Image (spheres, helix red, strand yellow):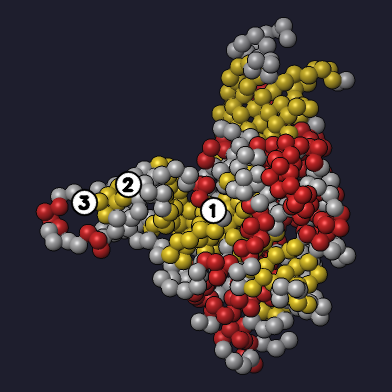
Amino acid sequence: MTAVAEGSIELGTIAQAEAEQFLYREARLADAHDYDGWEALWTDDAIYWVPAGGESAEDPNTQVSVLFDNRSRIGTRIRQLKSGKRHSQTPKSNVVHQITNVEVLGLQENGDTEVVASLLAVESRERGTTFWAGRVEYRLRRVDTDQGSELRLAFKKVTLVDRDQPLYTLSFLI
Amino acid sequence: MTSLDEAVGSKYDALIQSDRVHGSLYTDPEIFAEEMAKIYYTTWVYVGHESEVPEPNDYVVKPFGPQSVILSRAKDGSIHLLQNRCAHRANLVCDAPKGNSTAFRCQYHGWTYANDGELLGFPYKKGYEGADRSQLGLGKVPRVESYQGFVFGSFATEGPSLTEHLGDAAGEIDRLVRLSPTGKIKLTAGWLKHKAKANWKMLLENETDGYHPQFVHSSVFAAADSGIGALYSDNADAVSRDLGGGHTENDLRPEFRRLGNVMGWFGTTEDKVPNYVAKMRELHGEKADEILIEGSPHLMVFPNLFIAEIQIFVIQPLAVDETVQHVTAIQFEDGEEMNRRLLQQTIGSVGPAGFLLADDSEMYERNQRGVQARNPEWLVINRGANRERVDENGHLIGYNTDEVPIRAIWKHYKTLMEK
């Protein structure tokens, strides 16, 4: 990466507006249950992570998480959702993700751009309406594709504000 | 269908019959209150594991029925179950989920207790001249006993011992811990807390219901290479069993023995975990292969401890229609190579986003909504009653898809509720 995009805070960092557009798109695909579109956003070495309470947010290798998917497991999750027999998403939840407080923090050592945001996802299904709020850390990567240079998601960690408390089933894409 | 009005006998004779149970057992708040008194605050209830408080003065707050208790290890190593309630004005004395402390101090008026519950002191003591401090300790669960590190408590001051309560379920717990290279497991991987709008017995019954996996979990079989489906097919050699005392299991050993694969129970092969298998062979010699073929139990210890091969589940009833399921990955002492896999399989399959438990939980909640309908009033529990038989140890067994465990749970439940 050589160009410095307008508004970027560091050489090679993805600009605020482009980062925001990407996060909003990811949220929109999740809300729409566009499973293929959402899955296509991830890099091959991706991590999709929702820590549980306690020390879970510090060490997913020794502590249980609500969700800790590598790329292969993201694929399994999507296949399960697409099977039509994922009962906890049949019918699908009505969900709207609100992404706010977006900040581009800078570059990771490997060149990924670190972005943080606040999340409020409101889910409605027959059980009732559930609010899922938390801080989200993203790592975005620019990759070359047949369509030209595109952003991909290498890492997403959703730290829920109520992760210490009992949670209802979380089977939509948060 | 007959209705309750036509039934004869005791209240629970009417509600619980050999082939069906009444829907109100899942919806009536008065029955729930009676269950808490006669089951959760009477019989042995699983609370926590000794590995959660490994050092002197360690403590951890654990669920106990709709409430929580402090599981503490005193300076002398003894284990105590304390009520989180100051003897003065009932404020909480412990506000951290876990820690290490010789004492608990109430922040309201400064009363201080030792970690075995004894009152150490109160400020401005002249105002309490002549007080009998021995009567002012923290409330305690009067009976505490452990089995293989599993700590149980009973609010009844007298009654069967823990060993008597566990009966033949104890042997299944033995079968779990012997899979650890040291014979000891650790519950140190943290807890997922999964809430469902359903009666706790919906969960209890589901844990050893071998009929549902083919239907509830078919999406997993479609999405991933899973051997679970075959274990719960109608022609598997696995059996369901009534262990007595309300304890039930799906005994998968006959199927694993037929297949005869070392580590097959864990869905893997020995070359993936060579160090673990070598340690087990060193320890158990010729017996090791049998242990590593038969694998871990699928055991529901009445009323709240479910050992699901590689996970520990704890059922916590909060209200007649609300239950929390606490779950963690079993970890083996000196079992590093296995522990990472145990953890990752657990994260994938259970908890709020688990490939399996999210759908089980959906079923609990749908059941709870369904049972509100007025007709029929009953739930049918007679699957396989025509083909159940007694095994060599005197236990009722059936096909793995039969409702032997559900009938076993209700039979024991009825004896407790009629006391």
Q: Which residue is mark 2?
A: B103
Please report, as a chain letter, where disc 3 is located. B
Q: Nearer the viewer, mark 1 or mark 3?
A: 1
Tell me the SS state at disc 1: loop
The amino acid type found where label 1 is placed reads: Gly
Label ID, residue A121: none
The amino acid type found where label 3 is placed reads: Phe
**x then y, percent, for residue B398:** 78, 72
Tell me the SS state at disc 3: loop
Please report, as a chain letter, where disc 1 is located. B
Question: What residue is drawn where x is 65% and y is 37%?
Answer: B336
Q: Is residue B419 left or right of residue A8?
A: left
> B356 or A172, which is in the foreground?
B356
Tell me the SS state at disc 2: strand
The amino acid type found where label 2 is placed reads: Ala
Q: Which quarter of the picture shows residue A70?
A: top right
N-terminal of the two: label 1 or label 3? 3
Q: Which residue is mark 3?
A: B122
Measure the C-alpha gap from mark 2 to mark 3: 13 Å
Question: What residue is drawn where x is 67% and y is 74%?
Answer: B408
Q: In the rendered image of this protein, does residue B149 appear above or below residue B32? A: above
> B284 or A130, which is in the foreground?
B284
Measure the C-alpha gap from mark 1 to mark 3: 35 Å
N-terminal of the two: label 1 or label 2? 2
Asked if residue B343 shows in the view, the reply is no
Query: Residue most toward the top?
Result: A2
Q: In the rendered image of this protein, does residue A108 appear above or below residue A70? A: above
N-terminal of the two: label 2 or label 3? 2
Q: In the rendered image of this protein, does residue A41 appear above or below residue A129? A: above
Q: In the rendered image of this protein, does residue A157 appear above or below residue B74? A: above
> B165 or B240, which is in the foreground?
B165
Q: Which residue is mark 1?
A: B149
